[in-house]
Image (spheres, helix red, strand yellow):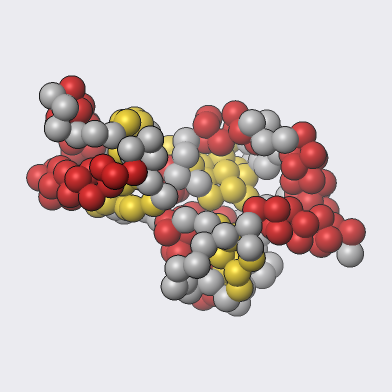
């Protein structure tokens, strides 16, 4: 769970912004909530497959049968020792984590691509993880959806993130007159700005709250 100081900062900032703050994550809403402890009300989980807005949670009605079939295949490969990764079922997709065995990264990514191709899925590569999804939703789509509704509508969007999957949100923010902020990474990015690490983000948010 995030530290109490951070949760308090996020609550205060959301209040100061009139509720116009959202979390866009590849995690489930339930998982995000377990970390944030209710600090942010508006959440897009699983890259927008599920959203919580104004207290109501909505899940898209996508056909998840390809995901189910691919997950069965991945689990079989894991049990046979072919797939050296921890499997996380996210309902609308699943993740293959190899943080505990980074040397297995190339093999995991190759297997992920093979499974995805066989079942018509998309592979999203992140930090020590390959995620298989239907590929029909991104964090950019989630940002765009929030921007159509109050209290976000008419505001300047600022997207912060440290993962490859945040690039879509950076693009969506820029297309709407805002900008992206890349956190802690040195890769090529569409983000307008970059900060050193999460501590720098916390300091920046706190300064904004005091301004």
Say if 54 sits above or below 150 in the image: above
Residue 177 image offset from top left, x and y in percent: 60, 77
Say if 94 sits above or below 192 in the image: above
Q: Quadrant location of the N terminus?
A: top right
Q: Quadrant of residue 111?
A: top left
Judging depth in this view, the residue of 208 and 120 nearest the camera is: 208
Q: Quadrant of residue 11?
A: top right
Which residue occupies 74% across, 46% down?
A: 10
Residue 72 image offset from top left, x and y in percent: 18, 28
Left or right: where does residue 119 sit relative to residue 44? left
Q: Is residue 200 visible?
A: yes
Q: Is residue 17 visible?
A: no
Judging depth in this view, the residue of 102 and 176 nearest the camera is: 102
Left or right: where does residue 196 sit relative to residue 119? right
Which residue occupies 53% across, 30% down?
A: 30
Tag count in the figure?
0
């Amino acid at each position: 769970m995030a530290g109490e100081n951070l949760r308090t900062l996020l609550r205060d900032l959301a209040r100061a912004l009139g509720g116009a703050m959202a979390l866009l994550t590849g995690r489930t809403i339930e998982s995000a909530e377990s970390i944030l402890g209710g600090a942010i009300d508006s959440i897009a989980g699983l890259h927008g497959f599920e959203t919580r807005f104004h207290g109501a949670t909505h899940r898209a009605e996508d056909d998840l049968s390809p995901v189910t079939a691919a997950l069965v295949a991945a689990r079989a490969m894991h049990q046979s020792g072919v797939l050296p990764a921890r499997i996380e079922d996210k309902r609308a997709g699943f993740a293959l984590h190899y943080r505990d065995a980074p040397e297995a990264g190339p093999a995991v990514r190759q297997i992920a691509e093979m499974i995805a191709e066989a079942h018509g899925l998309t592979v999203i590569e992140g930090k020590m993880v390959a995620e298989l999804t239907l590929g029909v939703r991104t964090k950019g789509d989630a940002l765009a959806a929030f921007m159509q509704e109050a209290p976000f509508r008419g505001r300047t969007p600022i997207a912060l993130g440290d993962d490859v999957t945040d690039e879509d949100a950076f693009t969506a923010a820029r297309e709407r007159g805002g900008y992206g902020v890349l956190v802690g990474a040195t890769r090529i990015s569409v983000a307008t700005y970059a900060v050193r690490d999460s501590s720098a983000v916390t300091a920046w948010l706190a300064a904004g709250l005091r301004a």
